Image (cartoon, coloured by chain):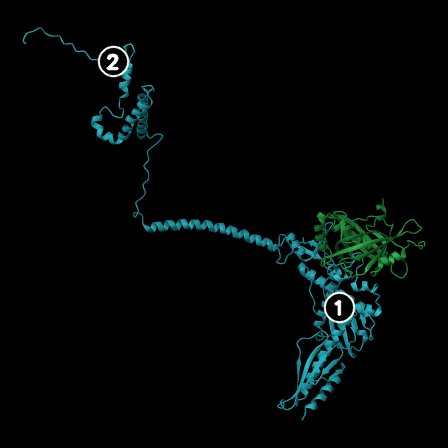
Amino acid sequence: MSGGPAVRISIESSCEKQVQEVGLDGLETYVPPLSMSQNLAKLAQRIDFSQGSDSEENGVDSEPRDGEWGKQEPEEEEDTVKFQPSLWPWDSVRNNLRSSLTEMCVLYDVLSVVKEKKYMALDPVSQDPTAGKTPQVFQLMSKKKSLATAAQLLLKGAEKLSKSVAENQENRRQRDFNTELLRLRSQWKLRKVGDKILGDLSYRSAGSLFPHHGTFEVIKNTDIDLDKKIPEDYCPLDVQIPSDLEGSAYIKVSIQKQSPDIGDLGTVNLFRRPQKNKPGTPWHIKLEAAQNVLLCKEIFAQLSREAVQIKSQIPHIVVKNQIISQPFPGLQLSISLCHCTGDKKINRSSPEKPKPDDHLYVLEHNLHQMIREFHKQQLSSVVMPHPASAPFGHKRLRLAGPMAYDKAEISSLQQSEGLLEKIIKQAKHIFLRSRTARTIDCLASRIEDPQIQAHWSNINDVYESSVKVLITSHGYEQICKSIQLQLNIGVEQIRVVHRDGRAITLSHQEQELQDFLLSQVPRLRL
Amino acid sequence: MEAPPVTVMPVTGGTINMMEYLLQGSVLDLALESLLHRLRGLCDNMEPETFTDHELVYLLKGQQGNPFILRARRALSHPNAPWHLRYLGQPEVGDKNRYALVRNCVDVAASHSLPEFLNEMGFRMDHEFVTSGHIFRKGAMKVVVCNVSRVQLPGNTENTERMSNSHLVELSVLAPAGQDTVSEDMRSFAEQLKPLIHLEKIDPSKQRH
């Protein structure tokens, strides 16, 4: 076909609108096409802000940095498209623009800080020096120095502590008044009367019936000069004891040959151990000494009362501070109360030289023991009345009336012996024992041919001792029986028991014992 | 047979006229322990002594108004101990300042046939009671802390009933007539018991209603 008329071809887009729905009457409803703004919005949503305008060139660089971010973006876009279809279509665009603005601002700030250096400056972080670069000596020195500083601090603290502890101990040693009072109260009975503190050092609560009050007063020691150094034995508490209990005392019991002149009695100053009563003696020493003085006074008072009241064959003599009695003829037992008050005026020193010490300590001790026994008996539950309304008194005496005891029975119930009788009996026994020992020893040293041995028993009584006397012949022990005598030394007599059981009683005469032993000696002689 | 004439004068002649100095007080059972502790500390150092006694009060109605009263007491805790017969006179009126009550006192120990003897003499038992408690002693002073129980059946000391939930405390001293220092000692002792118990003289004649 060569020449024919030109055919006009018109091209038009299909531009078919999408059908939304087809009505029941065949009418088609088309989806309205997007308007200009809607179209723009749709296109704007598709912008990928992560990619720059020259992203083709720097795509490789930007990829690793913003890759993730970029990947997140389309996901977010898809998310926003999927899950929030009703959102304003420019929303994602706005968010993206906003975040890019933030980024730009930050970059600008950093650049301005680097450039300006006015309010902030970039400072490099100090790098650790690599190990091995610093020398070990330097490390050692630095450690030593730091340890020395720490040690000095600790030492300072320790010094402060030890100083305060020492001060505390010093204060405690200084003993303030209240701690001393507490110590005093733990050992002695105190009571407060008005504003005075009084104490009781008598034995009344232990059963004594001595009428002395035994009250001492506790006073505060204020005569201390604070300027001068406090003396070692300073005590802020002091006691004032009754004036008649001052000083110290003891009871001297001695046996002597009878003094020819009776006028000498009572003038002997028998004090043997002078005690200096310094004003600075601690209170416990003062109180103990005063209590001892009180006890000695009570013993002496009891003894002298008995000496006067009890009738004995040879009357006892009581002169001033001495009681004299005669246990055996020619012998004199003197019991005296020696009380030294420490006052120089009263202490007359005896002109003659001091006699040998014949003080029998055992008897003094026994006197103390006996008076304490007496005290204890006062406190025994035997004196408590049953029924309760009855008066105090020994139980047996209360029975005496209803049981119709006669005088003999009553006297047998009561204690027969007083303190004085007991001590005289003990003195007699001691004297007899020592004289028997002396006699036997004398004979044994005088007679050589049969040997006389004495074996004293260790276990004795206050009123009885025993000794076994053996008379043997040297070399002939097997042939002839030795003579064994058992001597029981009592208060006034010696009882001799032979081996075969015969018993003989000897009196206290020294000569009698000597004669008897001498009579036994030839029995052995062949 | 008419009652023999009886005088209310104290027995004189032969014996020393002993007077009893007395202070009394009471303490509730709740405070008893602390009182006993305090007494244990203040009094003589002995083991605490407990007692249970049965006391019978005998009256002899004479022609005069006031009957003659004798108190017979036996120890239930010590059946072998003798009975104790006591006469207490009227309180002496004298010194108002004297802290303790003073009255004449005659104490006699008697054998176990005492109730029959008194009945034969003409006395009639007025009332009886059982006391039990503790005795303390300080020198010559006696402190008795006891509770009093009523005897319901006469002669039956097993079933007794406490009269109150408090204890009676008596501080007494037996001394010959004329020693007034005794009441001072009692006063100072009573002072030491002060916040726990107030011991004072209670005139028995004023108690009658």
Q: Answer with left or right where residue A424 lies relative to residue B13.
A: left
Instruction: Please identify which colour was used for chain B in the image.
Output: green
Residue at 75% over, 68% down: A337
Q: Which mark is residue A337?
A: 1
Q: Which chain is cyan?
A: A
Amino acid at pointer 2: Lys
Q: Quadrant of the C terminus of chain A?
A: bottom right
- Marks 1 and 2 share the same chain: yes
- Residue denoted by label 2: A17
The correct choice, above or below, for A230 with respect to A322 in the image is above
Q: Is residue A481 visible?
A: yes
In which image quadrant can residue B138 be found? bottom right
Residue at 39% over, 50% down: A145
Question: Given the current orientation, which residue lies at the most extreme bottom position?
Answer: A526
Front residue of A501 and A115: A501
Q: Bin the neighbour count of mark 2 within 10 Å (Cα to Cα): few under 14, some 14-19, many 20 and up.
A: few
